[in-house]
Structures are given as structure tokens and as C-alpha cells.
């Protein structure tokens, strides 16, 4: 046997060693007390009762699920007018973001996302071996020109969340079309529409139409937000058959559970619940943003949001950290994001009317008391 220099333990690849694990929204305070959780953009209305019923009736746990989630893909295809062969399901859209990065980028390549973009992009890009390149934002929004300026011959994948998390910012259809048109044909545009169900139909960004026509656009969607099924881990993606075929090779073999497939299928068939969630969110978000606008003289401002959360910036005497602690003392856990370059921002999931009233009142009291 050839002699080899041995390490004392298995050594992770250098690009894996550089990954910081995903940080999830918390549900309890430092003292372990359970808090009202508005930190992970879950649906405050819960889950469609029809999905819950279907989940209960799901197939026997001792049997493997349908490996191809056929019934669910057919239902999604019928709803969105997409051939089911162009749809792929994943263990949350997180799995699909990871397989997209790994299939098309690797060591020596680059993949781009925007500053204040979804934190998972950095992880899935590094996991592929490629180098993440961070594009500048435009006042917390996606800057198409700033992003395009970073595209070079090493670029393989571009990730854009629309609406974006944690900012809530949204690019209109014309900007998405302009971004796509300027990308080389061999660069994959992953348009993450995790919050797509919350966007008013007339404000659609055209992503699904682009994915239907173009060979380098992948749309990812999730059941974790408006569908209220975050705990079942279900996502889906659509794009050209050639893209879907490649991603299918490396996704998890039985990536959706029996219960998950059953609940998601029933959830797709209950669009009334999704519509109710969208309306609730739009109304409560508008009320909350109006309350924050009233605190502008105290340095608070809400970044315009098309999602189910609001990023509030603290630019006066009351700091985001103090507001975060104060809300926790009042029983609410939200998201403070110093690790994402936003020590001055709090991302607050839009909850029930009562929860939003309580948070707006608490912020007002704290802002007025701060010196
Ligand atoms: C919540 C979220 C997702 C969804 O992730 P799942 O794995 O489907 O739960 C994807 N992208 C963004 C930007 C999100 O905020």
C-alpha cells in the first residue's frame, strides 16, 4: 500500500469547511419560554382543513411513497397550466435550490445572489464547490444592473428570490424579463418564488411564463408559506424538460413522504384557503406598515414588501436589538438579522390582527421611550 500522510480524522472538503449552517427562526426565548413565533414566515392561519384531513388519511407509513409525486405534480400542472413532465417536487424548495446549484455549478465556477438575499443561497452554492458572488442591493431591493455587472465567463447560476427574503422587495415583470434577456444562455436563472402566492395576480412577475418558454429559467415554489405546510417539507420547481430531467437524477429518491404528498395535493385543490391567506396578509401588512410609517419621526421605516413579512429598519434612538429584546419580553419572537448584515433591521412575519396590533403598539411605546 502506498504510504500516505494521515489526518487524525476525516477532513471535510475546503469549500464545505467554509459553510455556516443555516440559522432558523427561533420559537422560544433564551430562558426556554415559548413565544408567539413571528420569526419564520409561517402562515398565521395555519393549514387548510382539507389538507389536514387528507394528511390524516394518508397511506400506510410502512410503504414507500410514490417516488415521483405523480398526483401532486398533475394537480400543480392543472392549476398553473404546466405539463407535469416539467414539474419536479422536492423536500422543501430548499432541496431544489441545492440540486440546481450542484447540477450546474462546481469548483472553479461562480454563482451570484444579491446582498440581503436568502441565506440558503450561500450554503447551496458553497456546497456545490462554486464561489458565491454577492451583488450590491439597491436600497434593500434587487439591482438588476448591479447583478448583471458581475456576470462573467465563470458564472453558472444566478439566484433571485422574488419577493426577496428577508427584505420583502419585489422586481416587476419588466425587470425580471430584462435580467433574463441579458444573461448568457448557459447561465441558469433560478427565480425563487417562495412567496409567489402572496403576490397579487395582477403583479405577477412573469416567471412561470419565462420558465415555460426559456431553456435557462428554473422557478422554485414552496408549500411552506401561503399553503401553511412548512412542517411537511414540500417544494416544487418548473423549467425546461432538460433542466427537470437533470435535477431529477440527483434529488432524494423518495423525497416527499406519503403524508406530505397527500396534504399538498389537498392543499392545491383548496385554493380558497390560499386566497384567504393572501387577502389576510395583504390587509394586515398594509395596516402594520401604516403603523410603522407613523413612527418615521423615531427613525423606523418598513422596506416595501410583497411578502408575508415586513423588514423594519431602525435608524433612530431605538435600536433593532433593543426592540428585538423588548418584543421578546412581551412574548413575541421575531427575526433580528445581524448575521446577514442587518443589525439595524427586524424581519417581522405578518401574523394575526391581534398580534400585529400588539407588536405595533409595543414598537410605538419603545420608540417614544427611547432617547
Ligand atoms: C421560506 C423560503 C423558502 C422555502 O424553503 P422550503 O425549503 O420550501 O421550506 C425558499 N426560499 C425563500 C426565499 C424562502 O424565504
Image (cartoon, helix red, strand yellow):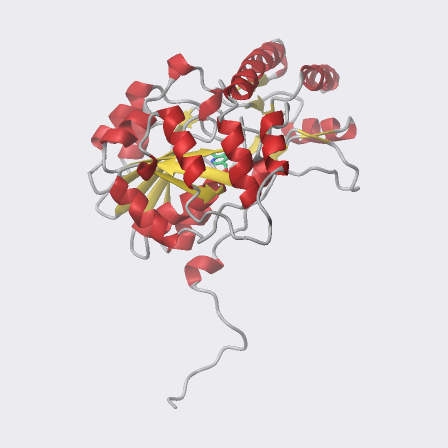
Residue 41 sits above or below residue 260 on the image: above
Using the rendered view, name the quadrant where residue 82 is placed.
top left
Counting labels gives: 0
Q: Position of residue 109 (x, y in %)?
A: 29, 51
Q: Position of residue 337 (x, y in %)?
A: 58, 35
Residue 326 sits above or below residue 103 on the image: above
Using the rendered view, name the quadrant where residue 135 is placed.
top left
Residue sitting at the far bottom: 1
Residue 223 in sight in this render: no
| Left or right of residue 320: residue 2 | left
Q: Residue at x 31, y 43 (%)?
A: 244
Q: Residue at x 60, y 10 (%)?
A: 287
| Left or right of residue 338: residue 163 | left
Using the rendered view, name the quadrant where residue 347 is placed.
top right
Q: Position of residue 104 (x, y in %)?
A: 30, 49
Q: Residue at x 40, y 36 (%)?
A: 73
Residue 239 sits above or below residue 197 on the image: below
Residue 294 in sight in this render: yes
| Left or right of residue 77: residue 370 | right
Q: Position of residue 342 (x, y in %)?
A: 54, 33
Quarter of the picture holding the N terminus: bottom left
Taking depth in this image into account, of 159 and 136 the one nearest to the observer is 159
Quarter of the picture holding the C terminus: top right
Amino acid at each position: 500500500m502506498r504510504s500516505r500522510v494521515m489526518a487524525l480524522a476525516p477532513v471535510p472538503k475546503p469549500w464545505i469547511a467554509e459553510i455556516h449552517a443555516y440559522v432558523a427562526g427561533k420559537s422560544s426565548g433564551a430562558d426556554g419560554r415559548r413565544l408567539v413565533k413571528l420569526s419564520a414566515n409561517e402562515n398565521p392561519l395555519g393549514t387548510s382543513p382539507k389538507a389536514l384531513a387528507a394528511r390524516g388519511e394518508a397511506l400506510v407509513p410502512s410503504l414507500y411513497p410514490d417516488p415521483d409525486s405523480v398526483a401532486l405534480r398533475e394537480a400543480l400542472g392543472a392549476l398553473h397550466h404546466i405539463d407535469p413532465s416539467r414539474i419536479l417536487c422536492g423536500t422543501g424548495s430548499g432541496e431544489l435550490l441545492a440540486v440546481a446549484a450542484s447540477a450546474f455549478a462546481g469548483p472553479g465556477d461562480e454563482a451570484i445572489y444579491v446582498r440581503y438575499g436568502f441565506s440558503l443561497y450561500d450554503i447551496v452554492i458553497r456546497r456545490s464547490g462554486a464561489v458565491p458572488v454577492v451583488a450590491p442591493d439597491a436600497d434593500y431591493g434587487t439591482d438588476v444592473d448591479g447583478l448583471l455587472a458581475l456576470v462573467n465567463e465563470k458564472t453558472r447560476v444566478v439566484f433571485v428570490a422574488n419577493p426577496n427574503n428577508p427584505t420583502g422587495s419585489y422586481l416587476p415583470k419588466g425587470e425580471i424579463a430584462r435580467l433574463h434577456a441579458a444573461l448568457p444562455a448557459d447561465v441558469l436563472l433560478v427565480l425563487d418564488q417562495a412567496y409567489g402566492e402572496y403576490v397579487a395576480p395582477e403583479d405577477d412577475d412573469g416567471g412561470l411564463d419565462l420558465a415555460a418558454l426559456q431553456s435557462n429559467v428554473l422557478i422554485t415554489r414552496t408549500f411552506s408559506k401561503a399553503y401553511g405546510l412548512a412542517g411537511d417539507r414540500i417544494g416544487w420547481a418548473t423549467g425546461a424538460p432538460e433542466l427537470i430531467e437533470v435535477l431529477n437524477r440527483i434529488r432524494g429518491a423518495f423525497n416527499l413522504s406519503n403524508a406530505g404528498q397527500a396534504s399538498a395535493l389537498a392543499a392545491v385543490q383548496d385554493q380558497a384557503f390560499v386566497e384567504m391567506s393572501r387577502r389576510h396578509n395583504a390587509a394586515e401588512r398594509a395596516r402594520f406598515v401604516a403603523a410603522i410609517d407613523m413612527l418615521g419621526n423615531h427613525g423606523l421605516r418598513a422596506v416595501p414588501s410583497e411578502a408575508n413579512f415586513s423588514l423594519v429598519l431602525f435608524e433612530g434612538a431605538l435600536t433593532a436589538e433593543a426592540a428585538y429584546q423588548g418584543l421578546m419580553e412581551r412574548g413575541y419572537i421575531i427575526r433580528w438579522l445581524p448575521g446577514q448584515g442587518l443589525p439595524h433591521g427586524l424581519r417581522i412575519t405578518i401574523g394575526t390582527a391581534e398580534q400585529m396590533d400588539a407588536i405595533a403598539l409595543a414598537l410605538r411605546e419603545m420608540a417614544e421611550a427611547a432617547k
